[in-house]
Amino acid sequence: MEEPMAPLMVSISGIRGIVGAEFHPLLVARWSAALADLLDAGPVVVARDSRPSGERFARVAADVLAAAGRDVWDLGVVPTPTVQVAVERWGAAGGLILTASHNPAPWNACKFVDRDGTFLSPERFPLLRERVEAGTSPFVEFERWGAVGDRGRESLDLHRKLLVGAIRTEAIAEKRPRVLLDCVHGAGGTLLPDLIEALGAEVTTRHAEPTGRFPRDPEPTGPPIRELAREAERCDCAFALAVDPDADRCAVAVPGSEVVGEEWTLPLVALHLLQRRSGTVVTNLSTSTRLEAAAALRGSRVERTPVGEAHVVGRMREVEAVLGGEGNGGVIDPAIHLGRDAAVAAAWLLEAHALTPGGLAELAAVLPRRYLRKGRAKGGADAALERLRESLEHRLGAPADPRDGLRWALPGGFVHVRSSATEPILRIVTEGETEETADERFELVRAAVENLEE
């Protein structure tokens, strides 16, 4: 039997679905109209990642927004963080991005940006959804329709210049490392190769053309990243970077070291950046505890939130954090903008490599060993999670943190089980001081989930 179609996913991460089934032009039109009604006065930025369906969906969004009296700044194919920077720095009312981020190729999605350049908050997103459900119709007479203009190149230049101005490019240029960069034929190819060169490094690219035809799993994890590390060694690169299709996540791989994967990105940036800045770091409940170790070495502390950029950003504001992000390779530097950004990650990793005598491998050597196991299972209902808590609480020997699914803090790591906001699945993340411990914890959870289905 064929698998049933995944339902439309609606969460603070936006709306996501399979193109032609749950995700279609009428859906985009409805949410675009609701966004026009929600946002304060001013132009709206529209952009997309490189998925072939994105061009038509972006056209629908731009036309609907214009018909609601909004001027539209169309950026075309650019990274999601570039949109956030443009909205904030240009004083737009908000933005709409057509991108399913790390989801497989058949998917597309809408992400919604508020006036300050951050995604709609957990308080604001329900207001948008209410307008969709009410069938909001904010349209004006033809004479008052907005204009649609192209500002794509200008937005990329803005993003690049912000980062070049923040980084010690002279140190990078003196060392002139070579970086292997895999853009998965996504939007990152429009910014990252030029940025890395502008920062003073050499770049060897893989899959840089933004065709939307993904040559690997669009999520920058697993075997493709390990292979990238081997390729970096063959081409004499200092390290390798891999991003997802909308370039808000960045995995790092250093040849000849244990540094391979997305969970290393934020701790390495923290180790480096917290030498400059003192303050709190905010991350989500699924991120490696390696981050706490990095922060402690610099006299800082870590606060955790439910998974999702909007949750992390909200807490960063509350505590005036100096750094934030998620273990999926998303780094948030509030001095640049309040959003996960692969370009920010790449820039700080380059500076860290240049200013550490032994490069990123030496920087990573001070961190404790942590091993993560990530997987998924069918399901996601709250009732199933409550039954899972009853099954696991005694065996794990610790109370569960219920802020986002179930999370158990354990020696040298944790267990986290939660409903995905972007796919109709349960996500399982386990961590331990050894691979065996991480695997044992994962298998324990998986067996408990399977027992629920019987």
Image: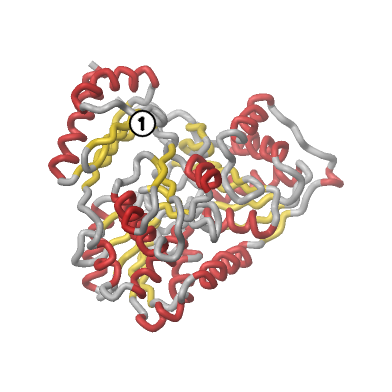
Question: Do we see residue 244 in this rendering?
Answer: no
The image shows residue 237, relative to residue 137, as above or below, that is below
Q: Position of residue 9 (x, y in %)?
A: 48, 32
- Residue at position x 39%, y 53% from top? 300
Image quarter of residue 39: top right
Q: Position of residue 4 (x, y in %)?
A: 37, 26
Image quarter of residue 212: bottom left
- Residue at position x 25%, y 66% from top? 361
In the foreground, 268 or 87:
268
Quadrant where the image shows the N terminus: top left
85 displayed left or right of 324: right
Residue type of the residue flagged with mark 1: Arg
Question: Residue tagged by mark 1?
Answer: 418
413 displayed left or right of 115: left
Q: Position of residue 397 (x, y in %)?
A: 21, 26
Residue farthest to the bottom, as pictured: 174
Give the structural element (helix, strand or loop) at label 1.
strand
- Residue at position x 72%, y 37% from top? 37
In the foreground, 326 or 410:
410
In the foreground, 217 or 356:
356
Question: Do we see residue 206 in this rendering?
Answer: yes
The image shows residue 231, relative to residue 380, as above or below, that is below
Badge 1: how crowded within 10 Å, few (<14), some, or many (20+)? many
